[in-house]
Amino acid sequence: MDRAELVELLSPEGLRLLDSIGEWDAKADVVKTVAALRKQGHAPALVAAVLSQARLRAKGRAKFGEFASRMLFTEPGLEQATRLNVAALHAGRFARAGISHVADLGCGIGGDALALAAIDLEVTAADADEVTAAIAAYNLTPFPQATVLHARAEEVALGGIGGAWLDPARRVTSGGSTRRLADASDYSPPLDFAFGLADRLPVGVKLGPGTDRGVIPAGAEAQWVSVDGDVVELAVWLGALARPGVGRAALVIRGGTAHELTAAADSPDEPVGELGGYVYEPDGSVIRARLIGDLARSLDARMLSDGIAYLSGDRLVETPFARAFRVLERLPAEERQLRRELASRGVGTLEIKKRGVDVDPAALRTRLKLSGAASATIILTREAGRHVALLVERAD
C-alpha cells in the first residue's frame, strides 16, 4: 500500500465503503463485486483499496480474532505482526515488571502496542515507514494512552519511558518482492542498538525462531514461542523483564492455553536407549530452546538416536510439550519392501514424519504407489544410528 492508496482508504467514503462490505468471502466473484461498486460511482483506486482491506481483514482473523474487523493492514504488516494472544503475554510481562510506559520501537501495524494499551499501559509506538505508522495510529485510535510516531527507533526520545519492546525488521522489500535478511547486523534497527538499550532500561526483542543463537546476549532470557505447533518467534528478554534463573524457555500455546518449560541453560540430552512402546515428537519450541533432555527426563524417556529430536518411552505420559505416537510395528526401511508392506495393508493415505533421514515425503509417497481405503502414519528416522520405519498411531 502506498500513501495515495491510504489516503483514499482513510477518507470518509473509503471507511464507510469498507464497513459496508464487511468480511470478505473468499468464494465471492471479484469481477462482479468490482463491477457493482464501480456502478455505485466509486473510483477504481478506492474500490481496489477497499477490497484489498476486506481480504486482509478476513485473513487477519487468524491473528487478531474479532479485532481484525475494525483494523487496517498491509500485506507484509499482517504477515509479520505478533498474534494477539502472544502479544498479550508480552504485555503481561511488562506489567508484572511494574513498567507503566512502554516504547514499542518498530511497531508495524501495532499488534503488540494494542495488547500493551489494552491493559492500560501507556504506549509510545514508532515505525520508520510512514504508511505503516499511519495504519498503526488508526488501529490504536480506541486507546488515548497510545501515541504513534513516524520515526526510526533510534530517533525516539526515551525520557520517562520505563521499558522498550523492539521488533527489528528482518525483511527488505525491493521491486515488489520481499527477501529475508540473513545478517542480523542488517536488521532495522540493528541488534546492537536493540540490545544496547538494555544498558538504559528493561528491553524485550522479538526475533525469528531460527535466529542464530550466537546473537543472544549473555545473561538474557531466550524464550521460543509456538502456537498450535508452529514456532512463531524468539523473544529475548533483558534487565527486569528477564526472570531470575531462566536462561532458556519454551512457551507452548495450544488451543488458547499456555504451558512453559524453563531452565537456566541448554539441557544435556538423555542417553540413547531402545525403542519403547511410544515415540514422542518434541514441540519445535522445545527443540529450539534445547530443552529436549529435560523433557525426556520428565517423560521417563530416552533419545532414540544421537542428535535426533525423537524420544521413546515405555509408557504414555501426557504432555503439552510433545506429540505422542503409539508404536504399532516396525516396517522395513528399504523402499521396495516398505511399499509391499503398505500395499498388503491397503494403505492409500499415508502421513510421513521424518527426522535424521534424507527423504522428500511427497516424492516418497508417490514412489510408494499407495492404493486402498486405509490410512496410516509412519515415522522414518534412526534408532541408535540405524535407519528405521515405524508404523505408529497418534496417542494424544
Image (spheres, rainbow, N blue to C red):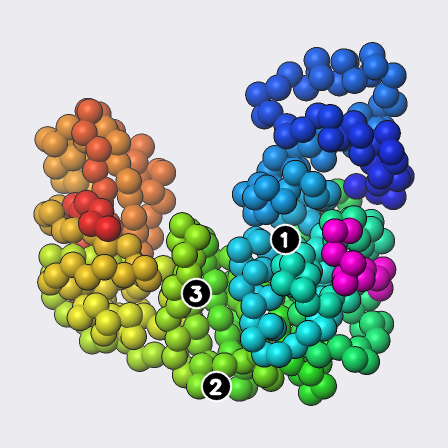
Residue 316 in view? yes
Of the image marks 1 and 2, the number of the one nearer the N terminus: 1
Q: Is residue 203 above or below residue 178?
A: below
**144 in magenta:** yes
Say which label, 1 or 3, has the lower sequence index: 1
Q: Which residues are magenta?
A: 141-151
Kindly identify the amino acid type of the residue bearing the numbered disc 2: Pro
Residue found at x 80% / y 30%:
16
Q: Is residue 259 above or below residue 154?
A: above
Relative to the observer, which residue lies in front, 343 or 227?
Answer: 227
Task: State whether residue 186 appears in this view.
Answer: no
Could you say where residue 126 lies in the image, as x and y percent from the top left?
Answer: 79, 63
Q: Earlier in the sequence, mark 2 or mark 3?
A: 2
Disc marking residue 251: 3
* Amino acid type at image mark 3: Leu
Query: In this rendering, would 90 be left or right of 1?
Result: left
Q: Which residue is mark 1?
A: 80
Distance from Cα at disc 1 to Cα at disc 2: 30 Å
Identify which residue is drawn at 75% across, 77% down: 161
Q: Which residue is mark 2?
A: 244
Q: Are marks 1 and 2 in contact (CB under 8 Å)?
A: no
Q: Secondary structure at mark 1?
A: helix
Residue density around tag 1, few if under 14, some if 14–19, many if 20 or more, within 10 Å: some
Is 328 included in the stretch rendered in magenta? Answer: no
> Few, some or many C-alpha atoms within 10 Å of disc 3 (few <14, some 14-19, many ≥20)?
many
Q: Nearer the viewer, residue 98 or 241?
A: 98
Viewed as shown, does residue 8 lie left or right of 223?
A: right
Out of 368 and 211, give the one closest to the viewer: 211
Structural distance between the alpha carbons of marks 1 and 3: 19 Å
Quadrant of res 44: top right
